[in-house]
Structures are given as structure tokens and as C-alpha cells.
Amino acid sequence: MKNKKTLLFSVAITLILTWTMQTEARSLNHYSIDVEVVSDHRGELQQYPAPSTGRALRSYIAVRRDERYRIRIRNNSGERIGVVIAVDGRNIISGRRSDLCSNEPLYVLGPWATAEYSGWRTSLERESRFYFTNVSDSYAAAWGDRSAMGVIGVAVFPEKQRRHERRYSLPSDLSGRNHFRSQKRNFAGTGFGESAWSPARRVNFRAAGKPVLVKFIKYEWRRTLCRRGVIDCGSHHCQRQPGNRFWPEEKCAPGFAPPPIILWQLFP
């Protein structure tokens, strides 16, 4: 009898785990986004895949100093989604330290919508442009925060039952349906650039507690990616980078995966 109960218990646990994995898989497939970094002069920047685990997708891009850029996000689902966007670990709406949580200011995209985010929001009418620069000139460093330099992070949140909460919305210039809610080494960061016209409006959106998908893009100068072996430039010398809470330290050898990222560590 004891063995029979143990067997039934094991079967039940297996069924629960299987159901959970299938539910998560459906969730990931249902809430899909494309995240691109677009240079004002070079267009969409090529992404070099990095080791990814679970819901955390990762890639590298090579950037140029003083290059103005924007973040393009495409909602590939038929539902509204909220996106928390952080550059160098700072929320691009509030400018505050971001942990990519649902209680932060976020943008809202309508079903199948595409939107571009070009700077740090300074009001409902204006933003200060993103541009690639040295860490010492970056917006995050101005606040004494170098904990996630050189990383663009996007967390996707599904919508809960609606109630009156203020989020942000950008007028659509692409799809018509957008809605929103000093180091020793010369690493890259994002500056607080010139002011630009970027009207936005507040909308009601209640985000779910946990993200269904997280996208990280690590940007570096091309020569740095060559040294790290991300881009094949003929030869490279391995270079370690300082600790980064949005980007795990890699071993100094190409072809080895970094430690996996566990989402509950990022989103307690």
C-alpha cells in the first residue's frame, strides 16, 4: 500500500510539473516580442546571440561613440502588453534604478503594435536622446550607478483585469496602434542627449506581477567584442568586465556558457 501511494504521489508530481512546463511554454509563445537597436545613421544594428536560458534572451551589438540610437519593440501578440525598459540599469521613463519589475513606470503596446523609444523621458512632450558614450559621460554614472552598464533590458508583462492606473502611451509613428504605459577600462554607456519632441499620453494598464519574457542586449565598442571573441576579427585577447547585475560574467574563453540566470533572483 505504501509503495502504491508513493507511486501515485510521484505520478501527481510529474503531471503538475508537465502542466507547469506546458503552461510556461504556451505563455512564452503567446507573448512574443522583437527588440531591435536602431542607429540614426546605420539603421538596425546586427545582434550576435549570447547564451540564453529560460525566459531571459541575450545578445550583443557593436556600437560607435556618439551614435544616436533608438530601441524598437514589436508586439507579436494579439493582446496589449506592458514593457519596462532599462538602459544601463535605469528606467528610461523615471530615470531611477530599475529591477525590471511590474511596479515601475512602463510603456504599453497594443496588439501587433510597434514603437520606438529614443531617449530618457523628461515630460509628456519631450525626451533626451540616447547616445553611446564612455561610462564616465553616461546618465547612469551621473547618478553613481554603474551596476548594469552597457545593457539594454526589456521585460514584458501581460495585462491583468483593468483598473485605473496610470501608465504611458506613445502616439504611433509606425503601426498606428501603439499604447503605453569613471572606470579604468573604456566601456560603453548611454548619455543624456539633446532634447527631442516625443509626445506621450497616460493610459490605464495593470501589469501582471511577473514578466513572461526578458530581453537583454549588451552593447560594446566593436574592438571590445573582438577582444572578447564575440565578433571574429582574426585574433583577440580575452578581456574581463566588472560585475554587472543584468549581465553575468563570462569565463575568458569563447564557447563556454555563463551561469544561468534565474528570474526569481532578478524579480523577488
Image: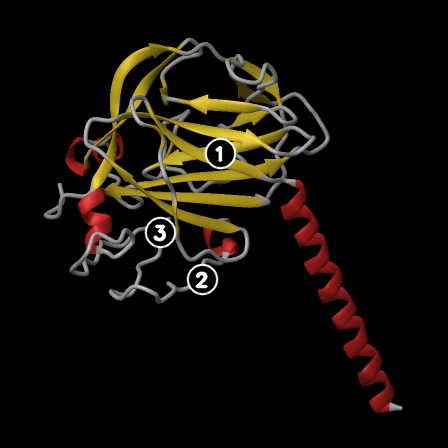
**Residue at coordinates 57% horizontally, 25% vertically from top-left?**
108
Q: In this figure, which residue is indicated by the disc labeled 2? A: 260
* Farthest front residue in view: 234
Spatial CA span between label 1 and label 3: 17 Å
Identify the secondary structure beneath mark 3: loop
**Residue at coordinates 35% horizontally, 57% vertically from top-left?**
248
Which label lies toward us, 1 or 2? 2
Residue 13: give x, y in percent of width and height: 75, 71
In the drawing, does residue 32 fall left or right of residue 238?
right
Which numbered circle lies on residue 49? none
Spatial CA span between label 1 and label 2: 22 Å
Residue 198: give x, y in percent of width and height: 41, 11
Q: Amino acid at mark 1?
A: Val
Q: In this figure, which residue is indicated by the disc labeled 1? A: 84
Identify the image quadrant of residue 93. top left
| Quadrant placement of the N terminus | bottom right
In the drawing, does residue 234 fall left or right of residue 55?
left
Identify the secondary structure beneath mark 2: loop
Report if residue 239 is visible in the image: yes
**Residue 246 against residue 12 in the figure, above or below:** above
**Residue 122 against residue 3 in the figure, above or below:** above
Report if residue 181 is visible in the image: no
* Farthest left residue in view: 184
Identify the image quadrant of residue 183. top left
Query: Reading the chain from its start, which is encountered first: label 2 or label 3?
Result: 3
Spatial CA span between label 2 and label 3: 10 Å
Q: In this figure, which residue is indicated by the disc labeled 3? A: 247
